[in-house]
Image (tube, helix red, strand yellow):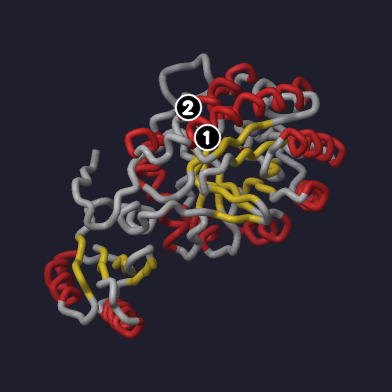
Amino acid sequence: MFVVMARAATESEILGVKSHILSEGMTPYDHAGQERVVIAVVGEVGPRKQVLMSRLAALPGVETITPISRPFKLTSREFHPEDTVIRVLDAVVGDGGLTVMAGPCSVESRAQLMETVDAVAAAGATIIRGGAFKPRTSPYAFQGLGVEALRYLAEARERTGLPTITEVMEPNQVDIVAEYVDILQIGTRNMQNYSLLNAAGRVARPVMLKRGFGSTVEEFLMAAEYIVAAGNPNVILCERGIRTFETYTRNTLDLSAVPLLHHLTHLPVVVDPSHATGKRWLVKPLAIGGVAVGADGVMVEVHPTPEEALSDAEQQLNPAQFADLMAALVPVHEHVRSLHGDPLVTGAALGIGAGGLSKH
Ligand code: PEP
Ligand code: MN
């Protein structure tokens, strides 16, 4: 449930509500919106729900109590109607601008990374990607350069001025990755690795969470909820394709998830057409598609010589193909931006008390 405070509620009334929630064995999370403070009550309520609701309603400064049927709370639009905007160095994600994360699937050498980052930065990328710890289907495939790659990523950040993102696969890698890299990525295979989600929730770095290839949108949001509930509000969601009966593409990019997520959550949403399709020539049309349906950005794999890549050779773009993609993407984004006020296009930003919310 959410406790909606009156517009004129004082600091001490807000504190009073929060300490009452704590005394009931629940956890309060407050969000100061443009007009009022909303406090989410999180924990096992069970049969006490009605009693708790009426006790909270009687406290000074409380306007209403809104029961919430959705399982995700802190990530929901009802709790936090405004879009979450994430700032990392000079990059801003979720403010209506176009975020482009680009770089190799795996960091293979210093020279390979520097050549790639120079090219993608010149073409307009806003964030550098590069895998250091690689989740490979085969234990015999290239597993990544590990900490050596993290050092190259830190150098790439110095060189370009752009923030960096890399995948973290285990809770015990979180601190070292956070030391060298600006954004932590949790991959599709780990979307429901709850100890990793909790560890990422405790670090002072934004986290990009990729959708599990077999997960529903609700499961995706529940995974994001773990990170936010553990204390990290800066989560970027990434739709990277789900497994369907189609085998021609590596996965099926679920474009409907983009406006749906914008409707359900305040968190920024990006699409990854590289892992979604597994095919170089499909990256451009689906990146354009993602931006057209309102994604806040894209993640694209780029390699100086994709055919020779140690991982995902079939889906990486070369620098010229990436520059060509950027030239197509920017005008599409400019056009779609003009539609952003239209809730029927990008998903509605539904405020508390706006009513009319249905599960589907
Ligand atoms: C990646 O981005 O490097 C990656 C492995 O992606 P995913 O987790 O979506 O497969
Ligand atoms: Mn890859």
Q: For the view shown, which residue lies furthest in the front direction?
A: 338
Q: Residue at x 55, y 38 (%)?
A: 297
Q: Label 1 is placed on what type of residue?
A: Val
Q: Label 2 is placed on what type of residue?
A: Leu
Give the quadrant of the N terminus: bottom left
Position of 13 relative to 168 (above/below): below
Position of 135 relative to 355 (above/below): above
Question: Along the horizontal axis of the image, is 180 left or right of 183?
Answer: right
Q: Quadrant of residue 45?
A: bottom left
The image position of residue 77, as x and y in percent, is 34, 52
Instruction: Check contact, mark 2 vs mark 1: CB within 8 A.
Output: yes
Question: Along the horizontal axis of the image, is 139 left or right of 15?
Answer: right
The image position of residue 160, as x and y in percent, is 79, 47
Q: Residue at x 68, y 37 (%)?
A: 102
Question: Along the horizontal axis of the image, is 235 left or right of 50?
Answer: right
The mark nearer the N terminus, 2 or 1, is 2
Residue located beneath label 1 in the image: 271
Q: Quadrant of residue 4?
A: bottom left
Numbered label attached to residue 253: 2
Q: Residue at x 22, y 46 (%)?
A: 357
Give the quadrant of the C terminus: top left
